[in-house]
Amino acid sequence: MIVVVNNNASKEQFDNLVSWIEAQNVKLHFSKGETHTVIGLVGDTTKIDTELLEGLDIVSQVTRVSDPFKNANRKFHPDDTTVTVGNTKVGCGNFALIAGPCSVESEEQIVEIAKAVKAAGATMLRGGAFKPRTSPYDFQGLRDEGLKLLLTAKKEVGLPIVTEIMNADHIPLFEDVDVIQVGARNMQNFELLKELGKTNKPILLKRGLANTLKEFLMSAEYVMSEGNENVILCERGIRTFETYTRNTLDISAVPMLKELSHLPVVVDPSHASGVSRLVKPLSLSAAAVGADGLMIEVHNNPQYARCDGPQSLTPAQFEDTAKAVKKVLEAIK
């Protein structure tokens, strides 16, 4: 349920209303605008008398929300959310350019790529330390050592780092990580999501291989319901019957998610296509439809990459893509 309160209400009137609502055993979410304050009621609101609320002078509107996701819902939070990562912001006109290798392979590799992507305009450095792979025989990442190497690269170039978590037991290892990524395979690992919701870390949540947007937003709700509202949604392509690409980029998901939710939305064109030559055109389309950022895989020697080389850009290709994306962003302002 949503209760819209006029901002000309006195503090006493507002506090009395809040106290009455809290007595109904529901959680409250506040979003203050220029003329109104939106109070989102989360929980069992079936017994709350809407006519009683509508009769109050300070209340301009009462609406029951049928969507199962509440905290992530734009109706609860009409204004776009900005997620702050160090000195970097995502959302509300702040475009994030997240770049780096699929997996951290060595100190030399990650530092060289970090320097290259920063010079090309990247605002965050991505790199996998713990890698979920389809085959148990594939490279699984350097794990703890990979995290240390990411932090070394961060110290070298000053970019915030983004890396994927696999298990809630690993959360203590991610204390110095700036953004914790939840991969597509873990989008519905609800116990992990709840534990991440108890942290104050920004969470980059990827859409599952075959999940609907409602299911995607419900996963974000798991994080937010525990108190962590710093969630960035990532569209990374879904599985369809097409075989020429690794996945199919659901470009319509970007404007649809922004209509349904106030959370920032970024796009991963690398995993969406699996083909490096498609990354640039998909990046341009994502920027054109209003994405708040891109997450692009970059490797200094893609042909020798231990993970996802065919979809990785070289530093030069990334620089070219970044320049083209900048032109699109300027054109749609």
Image (cartoon, rainbow, N blue to C red):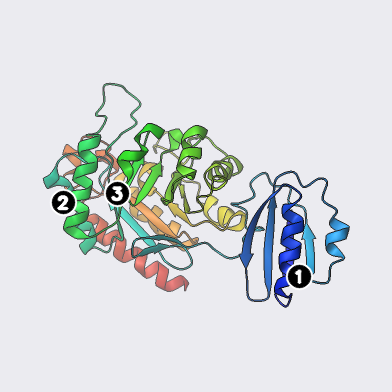
Disc on the earlier residue, 1 or 3: 1
Image spot of residue 32 (x, y percent): 62, 68
| Image point (19%, 59%), residue name | 157
Point out residue 110 in the picture as x, y percentages from the top left corner: 18, 47
**Picture residue at 81% right of the left edge, 45% below the top:** 46
Look at 75% across and 55% down and name the residue there: 21
Against 280, is 222 above or below? above
User: Around disc 3, counting alpha carbons within 10 Å, would you say few (fewer than 14), some (14 to 19), or many (20 or more)?
Assistant: few
The quadrant in which residue 103 appears is: top left
Marks 1 and 3: CB-CB under 8 Å? no
The dot on residue 176 is 3
Nearer to the camera, 249 or 122? 122
Quote the CA–CA distance across marks 2 and 3. Answer: 17 Å
Q: Nearer the viewer, mark 2 or mark 1?
A: 1
Q: Report x, y in % for residue 86.
A: 34, 61
- Residue 13: mark in rendering: 1
Secondary structure of the residue carrying numbered label 3: loop
